[in-house]
Each structure stands twice: as C-alpha cells, then as structure tokens.
Image (cartoon, rainbow, N blue to C red):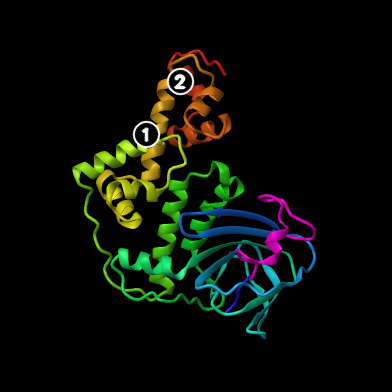
Amino acid sequence: MSMDGHDAGSPHRQREPRNGVPGPAGPHVWMLHSADAAIVRMRHDGGPLGVGMPIPCVDAFSVIVQRRDFTAHRLWKRGRLVFRGGHAAGTLAITHLGDEWRCAHDAPFDNVRVQLPAAVLEDCARDAGLRGGGTLRAPPGTRDPVIVALLQSLLPALTDPACAAPLFVDETMLTLQQHLLRSYGGAVGRPARPGRLSAAQHRIACEFLAAHAFDRVSVAAVAEACGLSRSHFTRAFLETTGRTPQQWMLAHRLQQVHSLLRGPLTLAQIASACGFADQSHLTRTFRRAYGLSPGAWRRTAGVTDTG
C-alpha cells in the first residue's frame, strides 16, 4: 500500500497562491472540483519537502497516478512507517483516508489524484445496479491504462479550471467511479439498463442543454430537470441520442458557430458569443470536429474571413 499524501487538506496545498503556481518551497498545484470529487495535479521539481502534517481523517479514497518516476517517498500510518521507496511512472495507488497518514516527499514528483468520498461510491454502485464495492484496493505497482487515460483527459481542465466544461468533468468522473468499483472494489452484478429517456425527458434535456449551451452547466442540473439521478440520466441520454450530454452540447455550439461564420463577426467575436475561451479554443475545437479551421471553412464557403 502506498500513497502520495498531499491530498486536499495537506499543509503543502495551503502555500499555493493560485492554480499551477508554486508557493515558497512548495509544489505546483492544479485543482479542479467535480460535483462530488476533488481532482488535483501536483508537481515538484525541487529538493525534499520533508514530513508533512497529518492528513485529515475522512471516509474517502485517494486515487493517485504517477506521471513520472517518483524515486523516494516515505509513508506513515498511525505513526508507524509503512512504506519507504518509490513509485514508477504510470503506477496507481489507492488509499482509504480513514486512518491518520503522514508522508515525506524525498524526491521530485508529478502526479494526478482524485479524492472520492465513500458515500459517493456507494451511491454510484447502487445507481448502477452493482453489489459490493464498499472499499477499494489496488496491489502495489498496479498499472491501469483506463484510469491513466481518464485522468490524462482532465489535464487541460486542471490547467485552466475557469474554462473547463463541467459536463465533461462530471461525465469523466462518473466513468472513473464505475471503473474503480468494478476493478478495485469487487462490485458485481449486471449494470442496470437505464433504457431510453421518455419523449418528455428527451425534450426537457435538449431544451435545457440548448438554453445553457454557453453556460457552465453540470450533469446534476440537467438530470434534476429530468427527475433522474446523474448516472441514470447520463446513460439514458447516451442510449437515446448516441451522444453524451457534453458531446450533444458541443455539437449544438458548433452549429451556432457555423451560422455565425456566414455573417460579419470576427472569429474572436464568434468564440465569445458561443462560449469558447478565446479564438484559439474555438479554432482547436472546430478543427478537431471538421478537419479544418473556421477561417478555412469560411473561405471554402465563399465568406470573407474577417479575422
């Protein structure tokens, strides 16, 4: 068992003045919150940080993936040294935070971790029709490409939380929770088929997403409008539309972009009007979807590119 102890509540985080910028002698920290979890990236390129303060005891699980080799780490549980060594890049550690933990970072590190309350996992299991999953365990040195890919997909959101899409973050965390329950919680059972949204629920969901297409709307808000749990709604929406709520919303926003590209607005103005962080964000998203930039699309459509 091993854990990189700088989770939410660690004294090292209190030194961080803002996202991604290190405080005195402290690591860089990027933090993001979903509806029910804290996601943190921590990177330290300097010398040993020393022994941290005891980590607050909470009924939650810390899930950590190392982004590079972490060669020297010590960990105490209830005052007893239980680990001395390192963690290879790509390895996973899962720890329950119900005991008193302390750790010392004795080498540079770069990792991403998620803190998930046990009650959140219990709700997820119940909603998905799974049995068990009361605790999570991963053998030392575990590698899990699914978890690595899920956390990797959150790095842009961690870098700039103000521009992160809550729908995407929530959907990613729901996928992570179900994977953890099945792979490391011993949860069993055939996932309950959510079926399709009713015609009324489908209309409510699409109208809600369209009305909030340029807002920071969450899965919970859309699910509540439909009278469903987040997990049930997400799966039923995908079953009904063939898209996740985030994919549906992005497609809707890009339709608005197409309409505006035929008019006189500049690309920067279109980006702002359609809820993108800036023109570069719009260009990247448009190119991924259509294989060409908005300016190039304008030229192929015979529209004068105004910027």
Alpha carbon separation for disc pair 1 and 2: 21 Å
- The rendered magenta stretch, by its main secondary structure, is classed as loop
| Quadrant of the snapshot with the N terminus | bottom right
Helix, strand or loop at label 2? It is helix
Position of residue 180 measured from the top left corner of the image (x, y, whole percent): 43, 68
Quarter of the image holding residue 189? bottom left
Residue in the picture at 76% in, 68% down: 49
Total residue callouts: 2
Please tell me which residue lies in front, 149 or 184.
184
Q: Amino acid at mark 1?
A: Ala
Please tell me which residue lies in front, 296 or 19.
19
Kindly identify which residue carries mark 2: 261
Residue in the picture at 41% in, 58% down: 174
Q: Residue furthest bottom?
A: 80
In this rendering, the answer to whether 193 lies above or below 169 is below
Nearer to us: label 1 or label 2: 1
Helix, strand or loop at label 1? It is helix
In this rendering, the answer to whether 142 lies above or below 151 is below
Q: Amino acid at mark 2?
A: Leu
Residue in the picture at 39% in, 38% down: 249
Q: Which residues are magenta?
A: 5-27
Q: Position of 293 compared to 239: left or right?
A: right
Q: Earlier in the sequence, mark 1 or mark 2?
A: 1
Kindly identify which residue carries mark 1: 211
Position of residue 270 measured from the top left corner of the image (x, y, whole percent): 50, 24
Neighbour class for label 1 at 10 Å: few (<14), some, many (≥20)? Answer: few
